[in-house]
Structures are given as C-alpha cells and as structure tokens.
Image (spheres, rainbow, N blue to C red):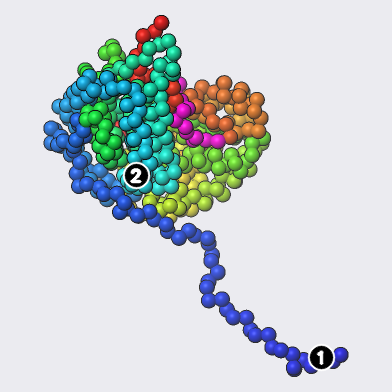
Amino acid sequence: MKTDLKAAPKVPARKKDAAAIPAAWDYAAAPESKDIVKIADHYGLFIGGKFVEPLSKQRYTTIDPATEEPLSEIAQAGKADVAKAVRSARDAYTSRWSKLRPSERAKYLYRIARILQERSREFAVLESRNGGKPIRESRDVDLPLAAAHFFYYAGWADKLEYAFPNRTPKPIGVAGQIIPWNFPLLMLAWKIAPALAAGNTVVLKPAETTPLTALLFCDVLRQAELPPGVVNIITGDGRTGAELVSSPDVNKIAFTGSTEVGKAIQRAVAGTGKRLTLELGGKAANIVFDDAPLDQAVEGIVNGIYFNQGHVCCAGSRLFVQESIYDAIISKLKRRMRTLRVGDPLDKNTDVGAINSKAQLEKIAGLVQSGIDEGAEIYQPPCKLPERGYWFVPTVFTNVAQSYRIAQEEIFGPVLSVLTFRTPDEAVEKANNTPYGLSAGVWTEKGSRILSMAQRLKAGVVWANTYNRFDPASPFGGYKESGFGREGGLHGLEPYLAFDEG
Ligand code: NDP
C-alpha cells in the first residue's frame, strides 16, 4: 500500500516547558513560627515560688546566637541572692517536701512531665532561639527526653525502698545544681527529676548563655503547683555557680560542664562533707570495623559529631576506621557532608544550627587552625553561611596523628578527626589513649566483637551500631577526666540519697 505522505497527520511541535528544569533539589524554607513563645524584656530570680528582683541589682543580656539579636535581660545572682535561694530550698525541705508522702511527690513529677509535653512546641522554639540548635533536634530529642526523665523518676518516687532493698533510702537535703549550655532544658531535667523524686529540694543555675528555657520552666512549676521553694532557679555566670558551690548549707553539688571547672569545684568541695557528682568533657572514639554496614556507619558518624553542632560531651569526635575500608568511608562521608544543611535553627530542614556563643566559635576556630598548623588535612563541604550570627562549617580532618591537639582536646564543635587502625587491639589502645572516658561507638556485624570491645574500652557508655542514643532508664557518666557519678536510671538516684545500711 502506498502511503500518502502529504496526507499524513502533522505531529504538533513539542511545546517548550515553561518551568525551568531544576538544577538542584533545594529545600524550600520551612521556618517554625516564633510567635508561640513570649519572651519577657527581663527576668528576675525564681526563689520561693516567685520571681524576685536580684539583690545584686545586676543584669546581663541574653542573645539569639543565630542572629546576635538581644532576647532578654537576665538577672546576675550575687552572694546574697544565692544565700536567699539556698535558704528558700532549706525551708521547703524541712517544712514540707521531705515530709510529703512519696506518692504525693510522684504526682508533682508526673504533672511536670505532662505539662512539658503539652507545652513542648513552645519550649522547643525557645531552646532553638536561645541556644542555636536546630528545631528538629529540640523538638524531637531535647523535649521528649526531658519529659521522659520526669515521667521515669516520677515512677521511682514511691518505690525507693524496692529500688534499694534493705538500705532504707532517705533524702539528703538541698542540692545545688549547675548545668551547661548544650542541652539546657534536658540537663535541667536530668538534674531536677531524680533530686525531687528522692525527696530533696533544689537550687539550679543554668548556663549564662542559655537561661531562657529554665526560666520558662518556672512557669511549669507554678502550673504544677509545686510547693514554693522546692525548686529555685538562679541565673548568672560562673561567679554565681562558684557561690552556690561554696554555700555552707548545700548538701550536694551536681555539675555538668568542662573538666577545668569540674576540677575547680572538686577542690572547693574537698573536706566540706558535701556530696559531689561531675559529668565533664569527652573525646569519644567512634570505631568502624571493616565488616560494618558502611552506609549505616556513615549515618552514625555524622550523627555522632554533627548532631547539636558537636556541642555534645559524648560526641564521637575521634573516628577510628579500619585501614581496609578507609577510602570507602572517607568518600561516603564527604558525600554525606555535602548534603548537610547549615543555617536558621528555626527552619525544620536545618541539620546544623548556630554555634552557641562567640567565645565557643573562637575556641573551635582556634583548635581547627591548630589542626591545619600541625599538618592534618582539612575538608569542609561547600556551604553558604548566614551573614550574622555564629557559624562553623561541618569539618573533617584526615591524616591526623594521635598527638595533635585536635585528637586530644575536646573541641565541642562540628569537627571530626579521623585516625586509622588495623587490629581490634590497636583500636582499643588508640581509643583509650585520652584523658577522657565518657563514651564510645563500635560498628561491626560481629556480636562477640561488640562485647569484647565494650569490655575493653574505658568509656562510661559504649554504643554498638548506633550513636547518641539516650533513655532515662540508662545510666550515663564517665571514667577518668570525664567525671564520676551516674545520671539516669537507678544509678542516677543514688547520689541524691543517704542510706542506713544493714
Ligand atoms: P563551663 O564548665 O565553664 O560551664 C558549665 C557551667 O558551670 C555553667 O553554668 C557555668 O556558668 C558554670 N561555671 C563556670 N565557672 C564556674 C565555677 N568556677 N564554679 C561553678 N560553676 C561555674 O563550660 P563553658 O560554658 O565555659 O565551656 C567551656 C568549654 O567546656 C567548652 O568549650 C567545652 O569544651 C566544655 N564544655 C563541656 C560540656 C560537657 O558537657 N562536657 C558542657 C559545656 C562545656 P557560665 O555559663 O556562666 O560559664
């Protein structure tokens, strides 16, 4: 059959697509609203169940580290303020809290936990604004864990006799608690929940740069109708902390922060009869064996060091890779780092937020420079940082020797040092070659290797095929210069109790 070409239907010319072909799959901004939380112009000290003006008459400004915008004026508690707070805690202890039935104490803790859950969005936004951490982390990690700690210890409050059989547990009195800026509300929960469950009262000092969620927590205490004076929150810098440590009527000091300040506190407390627990710095080894699932391990490495901008005492800041998989791990790691989004902490897409303070940014930059000067090889993915605020590009160093400062000192920033090993013995030896001993990670398919590594690593917590996982039932704490005493679990109650043994 002949085909009449002329009669053949014309194929219409293809229309040009009006929408440009995307060159990159960028995320649209997804900012969380700031309006959910009201920040007051200024705050007093929370003593005896109400906000009072500081006797010191001194204040300082707290800021948003992502924008450097001032957020509020905060009271700087002086010696007389600290004494007033401790008196209030002592009165509440003797007149009411220590006499309350344990099941009644538990009710207050349950109430606090539930209110924290109800108001979690408000707290998450405030935590991210004052501290710089991504909203995804404050919303999904800090807040659920803070509430979980209150729930968990509420459960123990009326079961202490069963928790410590034949030991007759009793409260010890007034606890002075000093916390850092990396997990402000979560550290508050770690400290306050076991102290109250055990029947003690509290004076807590949040970190100078991140007081706002602790101050909002005072509102939760009022909502829960906690008796006045059971929890007192005093703001201020290290001088306020030092006053609290030296206060004669405090029975126990619980501190989380730097090893340097921890040592100073230990010296101040020596010979006073005060109880002491210290949760200090770390330089954790994250160890990847050649039989590990590599993609999963890379996720764990990234979570281990870039979570919360690396402002994590148990951060996996030293990566040990078995030599045979070194090239594969490094290339996968660099590729994954190029997908990390650094920027606005309130954007739900953000992976890495702002550095907590200018001082911390300078410390990180100084240590990174030392790594370059000592001969390590630096890699930073291409990354556009906001113009204002404190930021640091996620960084990895290869070609690192164990003696370099970046392999020895706690950087407390998004900076990873990579070292290699050949045998499990070598991995253990190198991993333990640090003055710290807070945590470690092991990545391998072999269960027996996990168990043997966990026994030989001098670290309070060893994660296997995961990293940075927390649960209120699980004790946490360090060896060597990472401190002593445990928080979380039954172990976390013990430092807040006295026992009539036998
Ligand atoms: P600090 O140890 O100084 O701060 C922790 C807490 O202790 C804060 O509330 C602080 O108040 C208070 N404090 C400071 N000096 C004293 C004192 N003499 N007596 C009693 N309390 C005191 O840590 P920084 O915030 O100065 O951070 C410095 C370095 O410490 C970081 O770069 C990081 O390496 C490390 N760090 C480790 C943490 C960890 O969990 N392992 C947590 C925080 C920091 P203020 O906020 O006013 O200083």
Q: Which residues are magenta?
A: 466-484
Residue 414 shows in this picture: no
Q: 495 or 478: which is nearer to us? A: 495
Q: Is residue 237 above or below residue 497?
A: below
Q: Quadrant of the N terminus?
A: bottom right
Q: Is residue 199 above or below residue 107?
A: above
Taking the spot 27% from the left edge, 46% from the top edge, the residue there is: 63
Q: Which residue is mark 1?
A: 3
Asked where in the image residue 78 lies, by quadrant, the reply is top left
Contact between marks 2 and 1 (CB within 8 A): the answer is no
Q: Position of residue 199 (x, y in %)?
A: 31, 22
Circle 1 sits in a helix, a strand or a loop, which is it? loop
Badge 1 density bin: few <14, some 14–19, many ≥20, Cα 10 Å: few
Q: Position of residue 479 (x, y in %)?
A: 45, 21
Amino acid type shown at disc 1: Thr
Amino acid type shown at disc 2: Arg
Ligand 1 resides in the quarter of the picture at top left
In the drawing, does residue 209 fall left or right of residue 408? left
Q: Which residue is mark 2?
A: 119
Taking the spot 33% from the left edge, 35% from the top edge, the residue there is: 112
Circle 2 sits in a helix, a strand or a loop, which is it? loop
Q: 260 or 72: which is nearer to us? A: 72
In the drawing, does residue 201 fall left or right of residue 436? left
Q: Position of residue 455 (x, y in %)?
A: 57, 21
